[in-house]
Image (tube, coloured by chain):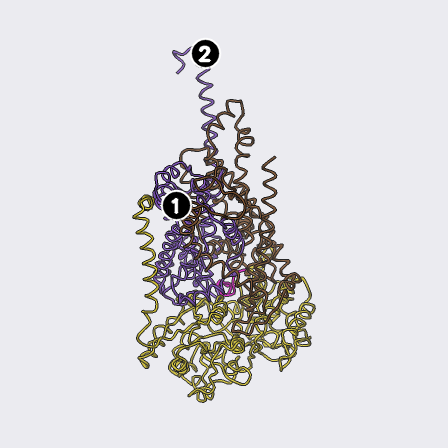
Chain colours: A purple, B yellow, C brown
Amino acid sequence: MATAASPMAQVRKQGLSRAALARRVGSLAIYALLSVGALGMMMPFLYSFSTSLKRNVFAFEFPPQLIPLHPTLQNYVEAWTSNNFQLYFWNSLIVATLTMLLSLVVASTQAYAFARLRFPGKNAVFMLYLITMMIPSTVMILPQFVLARTFGLLNSLPALVVVYVAGGIPFQTFMLRGFFESLPRELEESAYIDGANRFVIFSRIALPLAKPALGTLAIFSFLGAWDEFTWALTVINDVGKRTLPIAIRLFQGQHATQWGLVFAASMIAIVPVMVVFVAFQKYFVRGIAAGAVKG
Amino acid sequence: MQSFGKGFVCPQLAKTVALGATALLLLAFFMAPAAAAAKVTLTFWHTYNTQSPEEKVLLEEVIPAFEKEHPDIRIQAQGIPYPDFHQKLITSVAGGIVPDVVRMDIIWTPEFARMGALVQVDRLPGFEAIAKGAFPGPLATCAWQGHYYGVPLDTNTQVILYNKKLFREAGIQEPPKTFAEFAEVARKLTKKDASGKTVQWGFALPGPWAWYFLPWVWSNGGAITDAKITRATGYLNGPRTVEALDFLINLYKEGVLAPTIAQSGLDSWTGLGQGKYAMTQDGPWAFPSLKAQYPNLEIGSFLFPAGAGGKSRSVVGGENLVIFKGSKHPKEAWEFARFMLSMKAQMEMATTGQMPVLKAAIQEPYMQNHPYYGIYLEQLKTALPRTPHPAWAKMEDTMQQAFQAAVAGKVSVKAAMDSAAEEIDGLLR
Amino acid sequence: MSVDGVATHAHPSAPGFPAGRRPGPWHPSRQERQEALAALAFLLPGLIWFLLWTAYPLLKSFWMSFFHWQILGGSTFAGLAHYARAFADPVIRTALENTLLYAVLSVPGQILFGFLVAALLDSITKGKVFFRVLYYIPVISSWVVVSLIFMYLFHSEGLMNYVLVDLTHFLPRHVPWLSQRGTALLVIALLGTWKGIGWSMLLFLAALQGIPSEVVEAASTDGAGGWQIATRVKLPLLRPMLMFQVVMLTIGAFQAFIQFYIMTGGGPMNQTQVFLTYMYKQAFDFYDFGYASAISFLLAAVILAISVVQMRFFRQDYEY
């Protein structure tokens, strides 16, 4: 290596490689830190996944085994085939998907009006939205239940969708409004001057630009509906119309919890949200930032 | 996702999505009532766990048998998690949409009867016969102000369960009959390892709940209130009650009682199954579940020991069948209740750990030869009901808070019960 | 309430497309009227939905908080009795303490770790998405599920005690984590932190990526080092994001419910009650809906007050 090079060149070369080395060590350290952190974040899932592969008698074995000695899929089979679990799964999927789609429509039109149009009472309505974000939704259960009865919605999946969409309106409008405001308005203005009506401007120009924020909103509303427990418990009676969180709760017994079964059911429940998140996550970072806090 | 993202861009698709969503909603909305047309459908709420033997027999044997007898009635059975059951019933009553028939904890019957939510059943056809055939204790739990608002469905109580192998190892021949003997046996069954760590506890009170500590109070001659349920002072903080609770707490402090009394440690079933707890207490439902999970466990049982001031007493548990006033088909609901009180249905459910309430059922060979019902029937002879009062939920909560404070060593049992009694006096006024 | 700090301040260039509306009573021009009508069309579906299913139930429960509410009729007026009772109720004080403690324990951790991870992720190129997804998984998991997971990990015979006691002898004996006040709050706050790191990370990451590269380059040519760029250039630019997170996470912490409901149920002896678990108990164990509603609105008042203070504080800080 040193055969042809002058001493000067050699020094320079060494210096360079030292800097490169430092960079490499630095980035290695960053990756190491991130990996350790990620492992810490994943540990609770890994351990409960491991438990889901154990027979219940081994849930509190001593010493605890991270890798089960006698792994079995029995819990998954039992959870999945226990009466109606599959149905609950589809119910959750339908409710979450409908909530997501309707939220997109409702929140985007609302947010656009707040961001771009002038009308009397605008600030008052917006303030109302902000304030309701501070009031816990649990307090509304009884009135909402009576309302659902009035509309004949009790014991039906639409009752879930209706309340989930309503619950999401303030935050989602707030987030999307921020995003619309962060968009340049020139395009819309010129379209307006060219005589396009506002709905066309909204759907052809503003919405396409808002894709990242809409993707974010899609994730939030899907997740919210997928995980909701209290309202679903209250309004659904039919075994055939239940959603997943209630099913999981049913496995948590009155006398002793069957941990393996609980975690097998939980793992199954996590899969769809993972899929939705991974699918939309590309938009997520941009959408969440611009919407949450415009600059 | 990609297609969704792009799709939304184009307004036609956006419209389609919106339309589709609305259409789906409407569809789901209209489909809901359509499903339950033709015959009379009764909704029946219970709290059997999913995948439990009780639920299986109910759904696969009992209900089909009823539907066969009554082809015009369909039973829609709905299991609801026990911890959430009360909430759901309250909301349903408030919202005016109630199930037709409910199998509810006996202790809730007065509460809902006072609310005016239950159908009075004592004038309905066939009630007389049921009342005559049932054990008076469980039947009494359906009464509120001189009328009956339900029929008893199943009954139970607790006894002491123990691990036979650990008893043999410790050389214990006779089950303890008094508090003093019990303490001695429990001490014998407590083991520590070389480092001083407890590896085996003599007894596990499954939790700091009234359901578990009341048998001890009563077996010592203590009480919650006077017989007419007008005051707790002098009873809940009386010397016999305080002595019984002190007995438990002192054993816990001594290290003989498992930490379950402070809501910690392995749950009582797992502890018993793993040989860490030599004794615990529980109802008949514990047997099948323990057997299923720990096939090698030899479970023995004996009656609650008696304290200095009393005789062996346990607490009556069980469920009643009640019909809600909002039911559109009270007649059919009553038919179903009568069916559930038939020998046939009672014996079917008996195979799952649900003890029948009919006197005649006890004479059946199945019951006579049953491996563990005998001891429960024996204990039931002296078992007492929890206070049948609409404010029970609050009374129970108050007692439990006080007991937990004493277990934690924050206050003496006497002081804790003094203030609890005062608070309960306020509820009874 | 001043919400300007968050996102509501009016755009300097007028909203709508023509010039800004003058103050005073509304005397709309034809064009303004047309714009308002269009706005109405945009707003109406969501607004009606919201008014029916959120605003009305809220008002109704506010109304209920002034009554001895009987669920089958016969309610009697209670005036301010429920509110007075709440002020004298020792459990409400415990709940307030616990809620505050939960916020204080969980909010800074989420933000701190979230920022650290975001900063690290911002400096790498490969595997960004991979890590982002891993750190975000707790956020997208349901509260029911993660509460059960932590209950299991912190069971007195569970993994944590095994590691801390039997394996490392860090602690002398098994800790009954969830059955005593201090440790239970600690565990639930740990759960809250763990679950929230990803959310905070994502927001910071987005904000970091939103910083124009010219700004950083300019500072760099002025001779600023990595540390200086981070603290002098980037941090001030992240201020609005920081404030947003503090406000939102505090609101979230005050509304904590499922994790407490499932993991301790408010026990033992009401020592781990937070506002919402206690409210739930009043409503559905004791069906005292009037008192339960009053508790909710007291909580809302507390949240509102804290949010206002936080926004004031940050805004001053921001405009120095």
* Identity, as a three-letter code, of the amino acid under mark 1: Gly
- Whether residue C217 appears in this view of the structure is yes
Residue designated by label 2: A8
| Residue C33 vertical placement versus C280 (above, below) | above
Q: Nearer the viewer, residue B407 or C267?
A: C267
Q: x, y (%) of residue A50? A: 42, 52
Quadrant position of the N terminus of chain A in the picture: top left
* Identity, as a three-letter code, of the amino acid under mark 2: Met
Q: How many residues crowd mark 2 within 10 Å: few (<14), some (14–19), many (20+)? A: few
**Drawn side of residue A64 relative to residue C291, left or right:** left
Residue designated by label 1: A215
- The CA span between labels 1 and 2 is 56 Å
Magenta-tinted stretch: B265-275
Residue plotted at (61% across, 35% down): C320
Is residue B267 rendered magenta in the image? yes
Q: Identify the chain of the residue marked 2, using the numbered disc in the image.
A: A
Q: x, y (%) of residue C39? A: 42, 49
Is residue B306 rendered magenta in the image? no
Q: Identify the chain of the residue marked 1, using the numbered disc in the image.
A: A
**Drawn side of residue A120 relative to residue C87, left or right:** left
**Drawn side of residue B405 relative to residue B345, left or right:** right
Q: x, y (%) of residue B429? A: 65, 77
The quadrant holding residue B389 is bottom right
Mark 2 secondary-structure assignment: helix
